[in-house]
Image: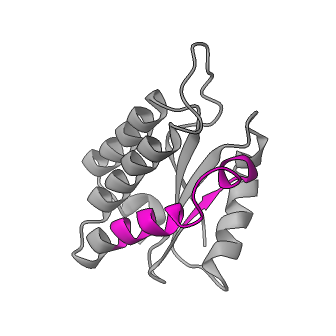
């Protein structure tokens, strides 16, 4: 299965809406990236994808990547330097565990959506939305070939 076929159109729309809703309250930039395979460490691959997507180029370095690997059943959340400097150390693990609870029962879109909304809620205290904030990164789901 191609990564772009993992979610149906309704699920894709739900995820994109969650990104937009989360970003309505924060200047943080959230992306979702899906691949089929991940050779090696999931965080290393997520960091590579983070760079490839240009997520490190946000003005406040407040990008957040939800990285999902279908066949290898791997998942990671990776924040940029600016965001990791201020959020609690265990925040991404807490959100990841919530997402994985949904994954365990086959509710992948629901898990990603809940994780995105929670992340937006948590990071808004550090990076609140301000009048004139620009949407620096696309809200759509990106896909890898691996």
Which of the image's four quarters has the C terminus?
Answer: bottom right
Does residue 55 belong to the magenta stretch?
Answer: no
Q: Position of residue 16 (x, y in %)?
A: 40, 41
Name which residue lies at 52% across and 32% down: 26
In the visual, does 118 lie left or right of 58? left
Q: How is the image coloured?
A: one colour
The foreground one among 133 and 33 is 133
The image shows residue 85, relative to residue 127, as above or below, that is: below
Name which residue lies at 29% across and 50% down: 11
**Residue at the left extreme?**
105
**Residue at the top extreme?**
131
Q: Position of residue 85 (x, y in %)?
A: 71, 53
Q: Position of residue 28 (x, y in %)?
A: 58, 38
The image shows residue 139, relative to residue 80, as above or below, that is: above
The foreground one among 3 and 109 is 109
The image shows residue 63, relative to residue 72, as above or below, that is: above
In the visual, does 101 lie left or right of 84? left
Q: Position of residue 121 (x, y in %)?
A: 42, 42
The image shows residue 5, relative to residue 60, as above or below, that is: below
In the visual, does 110 lie left or right of 33? left
In the visual, does 65 lie left or right of 53? left
Does residue 96 belong to the magenta stretch?
Answer: yes
Q: Is residue 137 visible?
A: yes
Q: Which residues are magenta?
A: 77-100
Name which residue lies at 54% across and 25% down: 129
Number of numbered discs on residues: 0
Q: Is residue 67 visible?
A: no
Which of the image's four quarters has the N terminus?
Answer: bottom left
């Amino acid at each position: 299965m191609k990564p772009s076929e993992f979610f149906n159109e309704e699920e894709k729309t739900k995820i994109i809406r969650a990104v937009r809703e989360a970003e309505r309250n924060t200047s943080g930039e959230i992306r979702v990236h899906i691949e089929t395979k991940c050779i090696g460490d999931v965080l290393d691959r997520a960091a590579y994808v983070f760079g490839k997507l240009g997520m490190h180029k946000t003005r406040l370095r407040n990008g957040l990547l939800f990285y999902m690997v279908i066949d290898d059943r791997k998942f990671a959340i990776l924040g940029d330097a600016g965001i990791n400097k201020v959020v609690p150390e265990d925040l991404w693990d807490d959100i990841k565990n919530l997402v994985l609870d949904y994954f365990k029962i086959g509710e992948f879109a629901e898990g990603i959506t809940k994780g995105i909304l929670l992340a937006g809620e948590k990071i808004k205290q550090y990076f609140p939305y301000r009048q004139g904030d620009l949407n620096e990164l696309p809200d759509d789901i990106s896909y890898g070939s691996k």
